[in-house]
Image (tube, grey):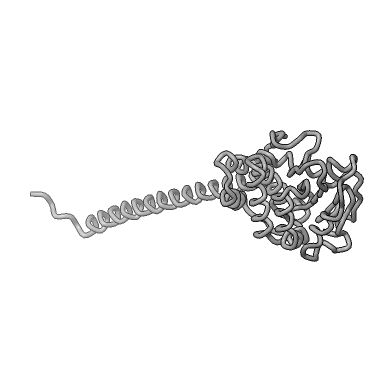
Amino acid sequence: MAEKPSAQDVREAQRVELRKQREKELNRQKRVRTAVIAAIVVVALAVVAGLGYLIYQANAPEPELELNQPASISKEEPTLAFKADDTKPVVDVVFDYMCPFCGAFEQVNNADIHEMIDNGEATVNFHVRTFLSSKMSTTEYSARAGGAAVCTYEDSPEVFLKFHEQLFANQPAEGGPGLSDKELETYAKDAGASEETLSCIKDQKFRRYAVDVLEPVGAKLSPATPAVFINGKEWGSDGAWQKPGALKEAVASSGTPGASDAGGASDAGGASDSGN
């Protein structure tokens, strides 16, 4: 018959068992701490990687856009032109889609300009400028809008006129992001643009053309916007364009353009950019 354990043996066995339980608990806590630390490290690395990617994206240079030549615009006379016969006056309008005074000009004169085009009363040349892109927009809005306008003109002159009107009717405030590319696409679609034209806007196909080709031509005509030239002579710099009907009256009384005026303004001066 086995001997009954003494009280000392029982206490020793209990101490051993408690020690094993403590060690087991310590090992469990250690595993938990290790797992928590590992999870924290993984999350921290993910956050750092995410921030690093965002910083890289913010500072990475944009891919250089191609300089595409629109099929509908003459290389010799890069303007968005609405031609009348050679006996009619020539009107050149210089504008930037971010320019608030250009928006005011459109409100007063848009209907008359459309009427002159529809009735063949004058050749009207639209000169897109983009110089306010970096000055008055955080997203190069003037360049994006100018390129989009070329896309719509490439679709059809009629679509461009409606799109042009929409951009000024919904003109964004200076200093902000301007209209988004999606909004530009929406206004183009409302103007009757094709899916191909919407892709042109989305891909910014003519953004560089607006900046590298149309902007220098417009700047040569006038460093200020808006600016109007009738048969090559500046008109409205005294604020006459603010009177409804004044532009159309001035065009009607201007007579037949001279030979040097047939292609639009060529000897224009103008105020400084501070007039915008």
Give the number of callouts: 0
Residue at x 76%, y 60% (from the top left corner):
105
Can residue 113 be seen here? The reply is: yes
Residue sitting at the far left:
1
Can you say whether 160 is above or below 14 in the image?
above
Q: Position of residue 125 (x, y in %)?
A: 77, 46
**Front residue (pair 14, 191):** 191
Query: Can I make out residue 127 in this image?
Result: no
In the figure, is residue 21 to the left or right of 253? left
> In the displayed structure, does residue 192 sit left or right of residue 229?
left
Q: Quadrant of residue 80?
A: top right
Quadrant, the C terminus: bottom right
Question: Picture coordinates of residue 245 (x, y %)?
Answer: 78, 62
Q: Position of residue 93 (x, y in %)?
A: 79, 51
x, y (%) of residue 250? 84, 57
Q: What residue sits 86% from the left and 59% below the top? A: 236
Which of the two residues, 224 or 247, is positioned nearer the viewer here? 247
Query: Which residue is found at the position 60% from the left and 41% from the top?
Result: 197
Above or below residue 146? Residue 226 is below
236 sits to left or right of 105: right
Report the front residue among 251 and 97.
251
